[in-house]
Image: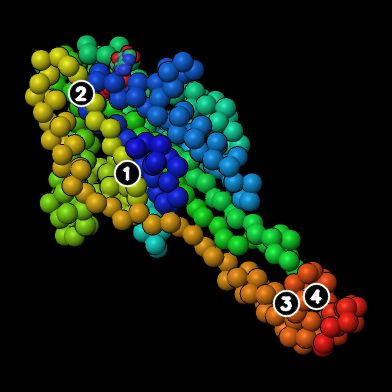
Amino acid sequence: MVKTTAYSRTHLGTVFTYGQTCSGKTFTMYGAPPKHPGVIPLAVQDIFARVKERPDCEFLFKASFLEIYNEVIRDLLDPKRVNLKIHETPNREIFVGNLSEKPVYSAHEVAELLQKGEANRSIGETNMNERSSRSHTIFRMVSKHFQIASTHLAPSRLIHTTRQLKNLVDLAGSERVGFTKAEGLRLKEGAHINKSLLALGTVISRLAESGGESRGHIPYRDSKLTRILQNALGGNAKTSIICTVTPSEAFADETISTLKFARRAMVIANKPIVNEVRHAAIFIATHKTNLYIYYNTRAAGCHRCCKTGTLSRGNSPTEAAAACSKPHAR
Ligand SMILES: Nc1ncnc2c1ncn2[C@@H]1O[C@H](COP(=O)(O)OP(=O)(O)OP(=O)(O)O)[C@@H](O)[C@H]1O
C-alpha cells in the first residue's frame, strides 16, 4: 500500500500515521535504520530505485521538511525560518511560503537531510513516552520528471514533464492528561496536538459523510495541519493512512476511537490525477518529422529506400530521390 503511494504516478501521494501517543507512529514512519527502516526511508529508496528503471527520463528531486508546533510552522532544515504562512495557488494547490527546498540526488542524501531535520524537531519526555513527538512533521519530496524521446530526425527531444509531490507525515499522538500527567509547556503542547487532531477528525468525518467529495463546507482552515493536507485529504491525491494502536486494555477507548477514525477515512474516495504536461511545440515538431518522412517518401516515390533507411536527416525530396541508386520505378 505504502509502496504504491510512493511509486504512484499521481500528482500527489501522501502517507500518514494516526493514533494515540506512544502507539508507534514515529517508529512506523522512521523505523530504526539501517536494520529496521521505516516508511520514509523505504519510500525514498523506492523512489530512487525507480529512477534507475527509467533511463529514458531525467529526474529532478527537491526535499523540504517542516513541523507544526503549537500551530506555528517551522522549517526543520533551516530552523531560523519560523512562523511560515500557508498559501494557495490559483489552481488550488496549497504550499508553505519561504520553506527551504533542498535538491537531492540519492537516498543517502535524503537520509542525511532527515537526520538533520529530526535533530531540530520538537521532542519532549512525557509520562507515556520518553521521546514523544510534540509536533506534526511533513517531509515532502517534489519530483519533476522529463521524458526524452528519440526520433529518426531528432535523436533527443523532450516529450513531456510530470510533477509529483510526496508528503510523508508523522503526526503527534492524541493524549489524555490523566495518563500523561502533563503540566505547563507539555500541557499546552498536548492541548494544541489534541485540537489539531480533532480538526483532522472533523474533516475526515465531513468528507466521509459526503462520500469523499469536497461538497459543502469542509473545515480545512480550522488547523494548519488540515489546511496543509487539504489536497491530500479531499482532493486529487493518493493517500495511505496507517492507524496505530496499543495492545494495552487501559487504552481501549483510544483504540476504539482510532478504529472509528480509520473506518471513516476508508469511505473517502479521492480522484488521483497525473500532473503531466505534454509539450505542444514538441508534439507538433515530432509530428512534423513524421509528416516530413511521409512527404519525402511520396515525393520521391521511393518507398522501399525510405523504409530501408536511405532517407537521412535533412534530405529534401530531391536529395532523397538522388540518393536512391536502386533501379526501381520512381
Ligand atoms: N514496532 C515496534 N518495534 C519496536 N519498538 C517499537 C515499535 N513501535 C514502537 N516502538 C517503540 O515504542 C516507543 C513509542 O513509539 P513512538 O515514539 O513511535 O510512538 P508515537 O506514537 O510516535 O508516540 P508520540 O505520539 O508520543 O510521539 C518507542 O520507544 C519506539 O521505539
Q: Residue at x 18, y 51 (%)?
A: 207
Residue type highlighted by circle 4: Cys
- Provide the residue designation for mark 3: 293
CB at mark 2 closer than 8 A to ligand 1? no
Q: Which mark is residue 305?
A: 4
Q: CA distance from mark 1 to mark 2?
A: 20 Å
- N-terminal of the pair, mark 4 or mark 2, is 2
* Mark 3–mark 1 CB contact (< 8 Å): no
Residue type highlighted by circle 2: Val
- Label 3 crowd bin: few (<14), some (14–19), many (20+), radius 10 Å: many
Looking at the rendered image, the disc whose residue lies closer to the viewer, 4 or 2, is 4
- Label 1 crowd bin: few (<14), some (14–19), many (20+), radius 10 Å: many
Q: CA distance from mark 3 to mark 1?
A: 46 Å
Q: Which mark is residue 239?
A: 1
Tell me which image quadrant ligand 1 sits in: top left
Q: Which mark is residue 245?
A: 2
Q: CA distance from mark 4 to mark 1?
A: 54 Å
Looking at the rendered image, the disc whose residue lies closer to the viewer, 2 or 3, is 3
Residue type highlighted by circle 3: Ile
Is residue 240 shown above or below 183?
below
- Residue 80 appears left or right of 203: right
Q: Which mark is residue 330?
A: none
